[in-house]
Image (cartoon, coloured by chain):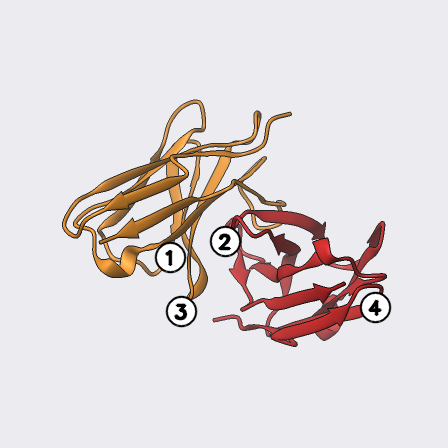
Chain colours: A orange, B red
Amino acid sequence: KAGVTQTPRYLIKTRGQQVTLSCSPISGHRSVSWYQQTPGQGLQFLFEYFSETQRNKGNFPGRFSGRQFSNSRSEMNVSTLELGDSALYLCASSPLAGSYNEQFFGPGTRLTVL
Amino acid sequence: GIQVEQSPPDLILQEGANSTLRCNFSDSVNNLQWFHQNPWGQLINLFYIPSGTKQNGRLSATTVATERYSLLYISSSQTTDSGVYFCAVALSGGYNKLIFGAGTRLAVHP
């Protein structure tokens, strides 16, 4: 069974631009969560989607948004990029919603904002 | 909010040595996972262990939920074990939201 896939793997943008990252979960998994990893803040939860609905959102500004499609694939969007948005963005999938579910991570998208 | 503390922050070992990594958490959880982050950034699942003990080859883990800690044991370490080890927990509340510790950076030298 294929793992979680994320595209693109690397991205370079300039301040003020917007970016869209994509995540395809493991086949059959319906929950997708997104995390941001930076050297200063570590790994932080961004949001969780299940059945095309955002169930929970972390403490991030409204510039960070996402969505989930009927096939469980998810995208996250960051508008008006700032230098501090440079980070590794990780997507995780799990079979169902619920905190007891094991999460499996993709390889990440490394975003650099210049 | 819940606090997740990992110790030690850094660990340097000679190949063949054993080590114990610790994760303390401040609230009741119903999910605890250990990950190894490889040099390319991907988080590799090691254990899903909200309670009890599990073993996988040279690695084993124990979580004592009532005392709010988990231990990851690495035996006969190899250079390929190098990297950062993360503990992450999720609260009993229905959301797939993992809260990560700051990690233990392990370097295994030949």
Crowd tier of the residue under label 4, counting other residues whose Cα lies within 10 Å: few below 14, some 14–19, many 20 or above: few
Dot in front, 4 or 2: 4
| Residue neighbourhood size for the residue with mark 1, other residues' Cα within 10 Å, grouped as few (<14), some (14–19), many (≥20) | some
Mark 3 or mark 4, whichever is nearer to me: 4
Q: x, y percentage for residue B15?
A: 80, 64
Q: Which residue is mark 2?
A: B97
Q: Residues within 10 Å of mark 2 (few under 14, many from 20)?
A: many
Q: Residue at label 3?
A: A40
* Contact (Cβ within 8 Å) of mark 1 with mark 2: yes
As helix, strand or loop, the secondary structure at mark 1 comes to loop
* Residue matched to label 1: A58
Secondary structure state at the residue bearing disc 2: loop
- Residue kind at label 1, given as amino acid type: Gly
Mark 4 lies on residue? B17
Classify residue A80 as left or right of residue A28.
left
The vertical placement of B4 against A65, above or below, is below
